Amino acid sequence: MEKINVCRGGSSRTSPLMSPSPEWKFSQVFGERAPGEQILDVDIISAIEFDRRGDYLATGDFGGRIVLFERSDKKKLSPRKVLETLDGSHISPPTYVYKTEFQSHVPEFDCLKSLEIKEKINQVRWCASPNKSLFILSCNNRTIKLWKVLEQKAKKIERMVPNKLEISESTLLSEKSFATNTSGSFASVKLNLLASASSQEELGAISNIEDVTAARCRRIYSHAHEFNIHSISNNSDGETFISADDLRINLWNLEIRNQCFNIVDLKPPHMEDLVEVITTAEFHPKSCNILAYGSSRGFIRLVDLRRSALCDFGARILKDRQDLGSRSFFTEIISSISDIKFASDGVHVLSRDFMNLKLWDLRMDTSPIVTYSIHENLRPKLHELYNSDTIFDKFQCCLSNDGLNFASGSYSNVFKVFNYKDGDEAGTTLEATRNPNRMPSSPSKPKVSRLLPSITKRHSRRESGSPSYNDINRGRSFDLNSKLVNLTWHPTANLIACASANSVYFYHA
């Protein structure tokens, strides 16, 4: 097939001449709500993540619970089906079943600061498993926990048959065996009677051995952050991980719960001099010494742990120098990076701010390769979004294993999927329902201007009385109450799992 080089923003990739976007279809759903059903706040999903093989999916909610789903079709594949899947001639979407759930965090109260710590799960991350057990990191605002999920054999008693044989001293004295016992041992006669009694009743009590899933908390990492934890990320070495709040990033060892190392500290001597905060942090997928973190100024900083113990200075900065147009009060807020994800090749980074989704090349730090607009129609309504705190919503992003497909959520319970090959910067809009409707997107892609740094207002949840705006591009109401924030891409298949309120929807291409 003839190939051309698609160049955007000064970087190029090899792309087919004609490569249409894949067609996305509904796969399955868990926790689907009925029309008009009221959803409790504790049931809303706040975190979602596939494991590195895609065999398990973990979700966390506002109630501090973690729910695990297991892939069900992997064990049912015949050798022929496996070969067909590897050949690519027949690829069926992965299917999942409910596995288990457990309570990870509970509400706490900090007496020293008179602060209530909610049980909401901010993030979940899968750790490397040396055996058949599963290891999961979960965090709320102040505490990180390491959980071990394992399969156990348990006996289930179906019915109880009481033992009618009562053994007492008078019974033993009346037995002939005691009178004729040469040893004269009272205990030996009693043991013999007990053994005979258990053998008689052994057929009466029936036990069933079944597999159960148990979750145990192995480590608790706490008292290391002064502000709310918003990001945790596992290192590729399988031994360490980082946790980040607004001003600091700490490095932990999985085996040590009471000690960590501060590697990034943005807290100035005087808080009045604070110009930016950390919004997200992520480890490099291949190099265990490199990590990246985003800031409220719209910058992505790459730091190398080998250069210095404290990585505040000497970091590479990825910033869009071309977006220096007109500035306003809102441009500094909407440019704040809410999420970053490394591609599997370790060379490209996907970032999400309020308006746009950007793909970066680590070898070019002056501008992103391509910029995708998510909901440009909301730009004239930034003042109303600011008054209702909607402008501070933090949307996540995800990308496929080949690094050519990207997805991120929006309002009205929809998310957008972009394909780098087809060159369509409008993307495909899908709604998180059983019948995802394709809707035309905005044909234009505006640029995002930036502003001098300042402290962004902290994210807060919206009230139910928020207005809805008419989306002129789609001709329908734009509901700000229903937003799709959390989604993740399967590591090996074209499968997206997205969390809408208390439901998990799966879509495959």
Image (spheres, helix red, strand yellow):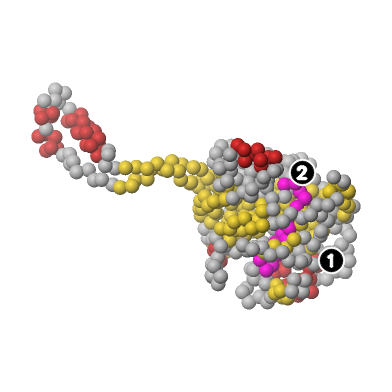
Q: Is residue 276 visible?
A: no
Q: x%, y% of residue 170? A: 11, 38
Residue that numbered label 2 is attached to: 345
Q: Is 185 placed left or right of 370 in the picture?
A: left
Between 95 and 141, the one lying in front of the other is 95
Instruction: Give me the residue at 51% from left, 43% from top.
Output: 150
- Quadrant of the rendered structure where residue 424 is? bottom right
Check disc 1 and give the amino acid type. Answer: Ser
Q: Quadrant of the N terminus?
A: top right
- Give the residue number, with chain letter if any, for mark 1: 444
Please tell me which residue is depicted at 58% across the width and 61% down the height of the picture: 503
Q: Residue at x 87, y 46 (%)?
A: 2
Q: Amino acid at mark 2?
A: Asp
Residue 288: percent from left, percent from top: 72, 41
Q: Secondary structure at mark 1?
A: loop
Q: What number is the disc on residue 380?
A: none
The part of the chain drawn in magenta is 401-417
- Please tell me whether residue 416 belongs to the stretch shown in magenta: yes
> Number of labelled discs?
2
Residue in the foreground of this view, choosing between 302 and 470 = 470
Q: Verify whether residue 411 appears in magenta.
A: yes
Of the residues tagged 2 and 1, which is closer to the observer?
Answer: 1
Q: Residue 84: horizontal and vertical position, in percent? A: 66, 40
Disc 2 from disc 1: Cα separation: 30 Å
